[in-house]
Image (tube, rainbow, N blue to C red):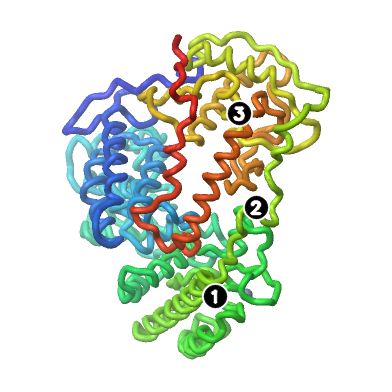
Amino acid sequence: MIDGVPIPPTEEFRSLGVGIRLTEAAGTGPLLSKRIRRAGELLSRAHGVQGGRSRKAEAVATLVLATGLFGSEVADVSAADLRALETKVLNSIWGPCRGGRAKEVVFSVLEKGHRVSPIMKVRYMQIGWLARAARRPGSLQTIIQAVWEASKGRPRPVGPVGRAFRTVTNLGWKATDGWWKWQLPDDPEPLDMVSEPMSRLMHRVREALRGQQLRQLELRRPRQFEGMQGEVLKDVLNKQLSKYPDGVERTLILGAIAGATWTADKAHRRGLRTTAHCPYCECGMDEDEDHLYWKCSAWQVVRDPMVVQLVRYAKEIPWLSENPEEWPPCLRLSCLPPAHAFKGVGDEIVQQFVSAQLTMFCRVLRMRMGRERVKECLFDKLGSGHKSYPFEELYGPKPRAEDQPVFEVELLPPSKWKWEPAFQVALIDWLRELQWMPGKSSVTFIELALDFEAHSGKAMPAAPSAELESIVLSLHERARVLRTALAVLQKNLKSGTLVPGTMTLKARSLVPLGAGPLAGLTSRPYFTRRSDMLQQLRSLAEYSEQRWTSKIRAGVSFNVGTSTQQRPAEGARERRSRLHAADNWNM
Ligand SMILES: [Zn+2]
């Protein structure tokens, strides 16, 4: 590290196509970085692969990850790189318009996670690498043994050996004999890397990785997913799901299982509805998953006959209550049958139970979708009921400026400021001209970025890490650059306050224009170029309205995929700053 900036990891040698670094630097090395970037590019194209979800998943597994992550069982890949790649995989298999889906369900229940999830695949490869070393005497085995002995069984998580052991211990495995015999949680039978048949061994590794994902989800979103205890009957579920061909019903059900159904409650929490009350019945209760699937009187006709069947099957399942209200949330709200609740029950009954529940969810969701198409009541129409955008701040005289922040900062050297110096000068000029309103309020970095661009007459520069400077930045990217630049200035401030308030991820000032809560500040200025801002925000409002109506029309409200032809969110990328034609920062 120099000045808090990591040295680019270049001391890398290539062995059989794998870049192995000699330094202790963590993070993704250059060779693997290149492969991952290539994989990311291929993934954005995989979305166009013809055919259903399973064909896309197969394309991802074979084409992309097999090459993209080749060698990552021994080379280091940063967690951030893997997460970014995982999101790309999710978008290419499931389409980009499905917010709120639990990726753990997608990768541990619906897909073969050890093949398509970059995170699970790397862990799977690491443990496989350890097991193969344990079975084959040779120099690798000696090295691992040496590391194990030198660290008294607790290797530091650096280097291939340490990282593989970290993966194993993160699964909750305890070493019982050297580094090849392990006690697994919830499994009385120890796992022996040397003598167990490889296929069985790797099967147990896959189970353990899936269990880890499901436990993580249960902690993250207990309201919808509590009760899985690390294992759901995924084979039963997938067999029953295979009876739904690709189409609306399948999409509705998969959305429900992954926790991605738009309820009034969720729409309210995302700022798309004034209340969480159920819009389909008159009871005044919030529409969450429990109300939707089990209580709403609007769907009673299709629900009741299925509930009768479910209760009848439940009587034959000793570990499951006859009262659906007592079922764990994962089963009741997300249709994920936890293995422990179905212990000792014949396959026939389990299949019938799961089939009946899927039918019930499907019928309720279908009926609701039909109702929504006619009533259009799930999302508020733009502007109605909401506080509207404070356009009045953009007209007329500003009040007298009082208690404005003062600050002192000097021109930062290139080691601290990675952009052109002119950008810093312009930024400070702009900051000095902003007039902050008294009291608490909020402003998004998007608005600030627009005002800054109008003030300086130049487009926001790209992030210093970006490879191509000429690339057209989306609004969000420009906002992110501003946020980073302000943070750098703040950190190097000599004295005073740069901006009042603090950073927040939930600035709501653009909510009336149809955006969600966004990153911003808990204070609000009068902008410096108010007439430019008025124009910009009006066109932003227009764009949001279009996006909004196309979203609802396309049925995204029910997560019925819009597939590849229509991707309203893409519009944001195409929104060039009208300043892009202007000069750039290096003068
Ligand atoms: Zn209702």
Gap between marks 1 and 2 measured at Cα: 30 Å
Gap between marks 2 and 3 measured at Cα: 22 Å
Residue 532: assigned label: 3
Badge 2 element: loop
Which residue is identified by label 1? 293
- Residue sitting nearer the eye, 335 or 543: 543
Amino acid beneath label 2: Gly
Q: Are marks 2 and 3 in contact (CB under 8 Å)?
A: no
Amino acid beneath label 3: Asp
Mark nearest the camera among 3 and 1 is 3
Tag 2 or tag 1, which sits nearer the N-term?
Answer: 1
Q: On the rendered structure, is 14 left or right of 255?
A: left
Which residue is identified by label 2? 383
- Residue sitting nearer the eye, 236 or 439: 439
Q: Is mark 3 within 8 Å of ligand 1?
A: no
Residue under the point 40% across and 60% down = 561
- Image vertical order of residue 153 relative to residue 7, above or below: below
- Image vertical order of residue 67 relative to residue 531, above or below: below
Gap between marks 3 and 1 measured at Cα: 48 Å
Around disc 3, counting alpha carbons within 10 Å, would you say few (fewer than 14), some (14 to 19), or many (20 or more)?
A: some
